[in-house]
């Protein structure tokens, strides 16, 4: 049997570990989004990123196998959701869509159903490709998932029968307010937490810690990885769709290298082994990025205005990534879930 | 036909050089150095900036600049990350790569810088009715010579043998007296030198240098080292060569379907990895921990 100290990550349910991240996400989103329309938009995009980072946490964090392929599930999710909700008039008249396959022209769903459809599409795509990919380990797995991303991107970028190819698909219906994306993200966080806690999540982490020993204990590595990959595909499909519904358009370039690395960086910066790490990484990276953006535009952040030259943001973000990893290679959360401060835990114990 | 083969060989050779440069560092410290692309870029910028001087001076300067940049990367960043998980080093190298791209953008601007470099390279040679471009001929010859030099360095010199030993099994190599820091620094310098050659070859073919100049090459070279064989330096070169040749042939054969050549390339990569997860030249049952 495992002794507890060997296993990093969740072993038993703790109310605070689930509740604190939920409260942090919900309260900061509601508070900031009420302040201005640009902040509302920022919060919406951040929620999409958080969904994507959660998806990566489920697979990359628990299995320890690096995946660059999740962008392709997001692409598929975005295409499904975008084509389902773009008005018929645009689909028939836009130049980029003149060769669109007829069933896709007729494909029509409302916003809620289109989100479900894209989650389903992401999951099916991941389940199918995962059947092959999960046999690989280490860097080979990373490169194979990258090949998947490359193929999906290359096809969607060039083929105008399945989408707008290299142009944007406009007119995708947008979230009317913050409720739906926020609720989706909070639900996803709860699901991810309980997945991490479940037998499937724990056996997967066991394979991360020691591949050979876990096989010796009778764990079917390919199967537990495949389950996690499929679940994360569902979340990635949903993240892609949400991104499309926030921006009101779908463009395949949005989900390629930049998106992939940005979200992976958020996960690694926060600490890939825990839900709290995923949340923290997303909040820190997008928060700093937004603050710097506002300073570049000379707008005040909490009453403080610093005039930064344009271009500072990108340099600081990239530099921050390197410095944080030098300072804490396991991410800011160091791979653990959030713990109550000591004095609170003492009150609870007494 | 001859032109097609020569193009394939020269592109294959260029990718082989880039893969070897990445593979040198990957072998000793399991680091996927994304920032290698910025080494290629700085080499290209150096050549463009010195286009007024004789090409040989510009090239020597670019070798110096890239190898210094590579060693600085190791001293300032990677040395401090020794021993952390490869995935984390990879993300750190990605951050470094983005950082350098932004610095280039500040220094040189986001728009391409161009200059005519070695214009005599773009001429054509005619042999009994067959015409081939100078560029592909020279690139093919240059890469063959360089690969032979690398082969000699790796097989016949003490440094090369130590490097190969460290690639195969770093811990055992250290126990046998290989000086780790020394070796890693040297392999970074050497990968910098290779990056200078790759940058020079690329910039002659396409003298439009922008901050993301080396990116495409680096990603495909990375694909090359994985399909070639993760812990084998000849494997790295072979994998890179295969990637370059496939890409070049696909571009010739697919005609209008050329836009999908990356899909076919990645499909081949996918199949190779499924059949031989350790790469083409892997030996025996090696498995990484993750």
Image: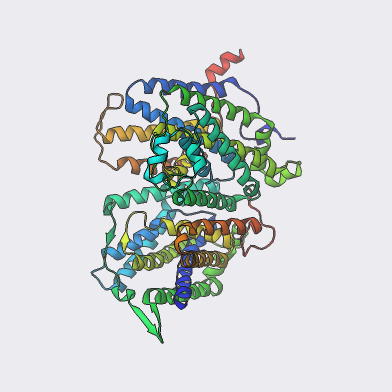
Q: Position of residue A137 (x, y in %)?
A: 62, 50
Q: Position of residue B71 (x, y in %)?
A: 41, 58
- The structure residue drawn at horizontal position 62% and vertical position 63%, both measured from the top left corner, is B280
- Height in image: A13 above or below A314? above
Q: Position of residue A203 (x, y in %)?
A: 68, 37
Q: Is residue A334 visible?
A: no
In the rendered picture of this protein, how many numbered marks are placed on residues? Answer: 0
Res B213 quadrant in image: bottom left
Quadrant (top left/top right/bottom left/bottom right) for the N terminus of chain A = top right
- Height in image: B73 above or below B15? above
Instruction: Left or right? Give the position of A136 relative to B194.
Output: right
Between A33 and B225, the one nearer to me in the picture: A33
- Height in image: B160 above or below A156? below
Res A90 quadrant in image: top left
Between B162 and A271, the one nearer to me in the picture: A271
Q: Is residue A216 visible?
A: yes
**Protein image colouring:** rainbow
Quadrant (top left/top right/bottom left/bottom right) for the C terminus of chain A = top right
Instruction: Left or right? Give the position of A149 relative to B54.
Output: right
- The structure residue drawn at horizontal position 64% and vertical position 29%, both measured from the top left corner, is A197
Q: Position of residue A225 (x, y in %)?
A: 65, 41
């Amino acid at each position: 049997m495992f002794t507890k100290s060997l296993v990093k990550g969740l072993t038993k349910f703790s109310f605070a570990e689930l509740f604190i991240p939920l409260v942090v996400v919900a309260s900061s989103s509601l508070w900031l989004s009420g302040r201005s329309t640009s902040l509302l938009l920022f919060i919406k995009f951040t929620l999409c990123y958080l969904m994507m980072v959660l998806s990566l946490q489920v697979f990359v964090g628990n299995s320890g196998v690096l995946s660059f392929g999740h962008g392709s599930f997001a692409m598929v999710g975005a295409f499904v959701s975008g084509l389902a909700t773009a008005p018929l008039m645009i689909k028939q008249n836009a130049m980029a869509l003149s060769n669109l396959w007829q069933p896709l022209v007729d494909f029509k769903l409302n916003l809620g159903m289109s989100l479900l459809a894209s989650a389903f599409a992401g999951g099916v795509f991941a389940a199918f490709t995962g059947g092959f990919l999960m046999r690989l380990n280490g860097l080979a797995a990373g490169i194979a998932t990258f090949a998947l991303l490359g193929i999906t991107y290359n096809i969607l970028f060039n083929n105008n029968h399945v989408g707008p190819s290299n142009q944007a698909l406009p007119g995708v219906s947008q979230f009317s307010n913050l409720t739906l994306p926020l609720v989706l993200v909070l639900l996803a966080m709860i699901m991810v937490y309980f997945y991490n806690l479940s037998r499937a999540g724990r056996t997967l982490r066991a394979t991360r810690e020691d591949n050979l020993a876990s096989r010796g204990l009778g764990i079917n590595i390919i199967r537990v990885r495949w389950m996690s990959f499929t679940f994360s595909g569902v979340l990635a499909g949903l993240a892609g769709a949400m991104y499309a519904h926030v921006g009101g358009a779908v463009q395949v370039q949005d989900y390629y290298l930049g998106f992939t690395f940005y979200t992976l960086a958020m996960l690694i910066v926060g600490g890939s082994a825990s839900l709290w790490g995923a949340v923290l990484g997303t909040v820190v990276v997008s928060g700093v990025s937004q603050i710097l953006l506002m300073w570049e535009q000379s707008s005040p952040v909490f009453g403080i205005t610093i005039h930064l030259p344009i271009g500072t943001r990108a340099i600081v973000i990239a530099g921050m990534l390197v410095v944080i990893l030098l300072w804490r290679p396991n991410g800011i959360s160091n791979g653990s879930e959030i713990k109550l401060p000591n004095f609170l835990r003492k009150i609870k114990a007494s | 036909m001859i032109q097609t083969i020569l193009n394939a060989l020269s592109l294959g050779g260029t990718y082989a050089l880039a893969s070897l440069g990445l593979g040198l560092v990957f072998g000793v410290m399991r680091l996927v150095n994304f920032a290698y692309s910025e080494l290629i870029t700085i080499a290209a910028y150096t050549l463009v900036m010195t286009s007024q001087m004789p090409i040989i001076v510009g090239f020597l300067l670019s070798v110096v600049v890239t190898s210094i940049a590579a060693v600085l990367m190791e001293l300032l960043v990677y040395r401090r990350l020794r021993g952390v998980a490869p995935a984390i080093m990879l993300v750190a190298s990605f951050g470094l790569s983005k950082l350098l791209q932004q610095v280039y953008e500040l220094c040189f601007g986001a728009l391409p810088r161009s200059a005519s470099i070695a214009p005599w390279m773009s001429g054509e040679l005619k042999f009994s009715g067959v015409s081939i471009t100078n560029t592909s001929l020279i690139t093919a010859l240059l890469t063959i010579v360089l690969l032979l030099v690398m082969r000699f360095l790796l097989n016949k010199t003490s440094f090369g043998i130590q490097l190969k030993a460290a690639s195969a099994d770093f811990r055992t190599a250290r126990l046998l007296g290989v000086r780790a820091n020394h070796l890693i620094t040297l392999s970074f310098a050497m990968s910098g030198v290779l990056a200078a050659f790759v940058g020079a070859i690329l910039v002659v073919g396409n003298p439009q240098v922008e901050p993301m100049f080396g990116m495409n090459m680096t990603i495909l070279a990375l694909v090359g080292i994985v399909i070639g064989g993760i812990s084998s330096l000849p494997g790295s070169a072979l994998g890179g060569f295969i990637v370059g040749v496939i890409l070049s042939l696909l571009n010739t054969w697919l005609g209008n379907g050329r836009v999908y050549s990356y899909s076919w390339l990645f499909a081949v990569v996918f199949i190779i990895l499924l059949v031989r997860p350790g790469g083409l030249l892997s030996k025996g049952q090696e498995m990484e921990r993750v």
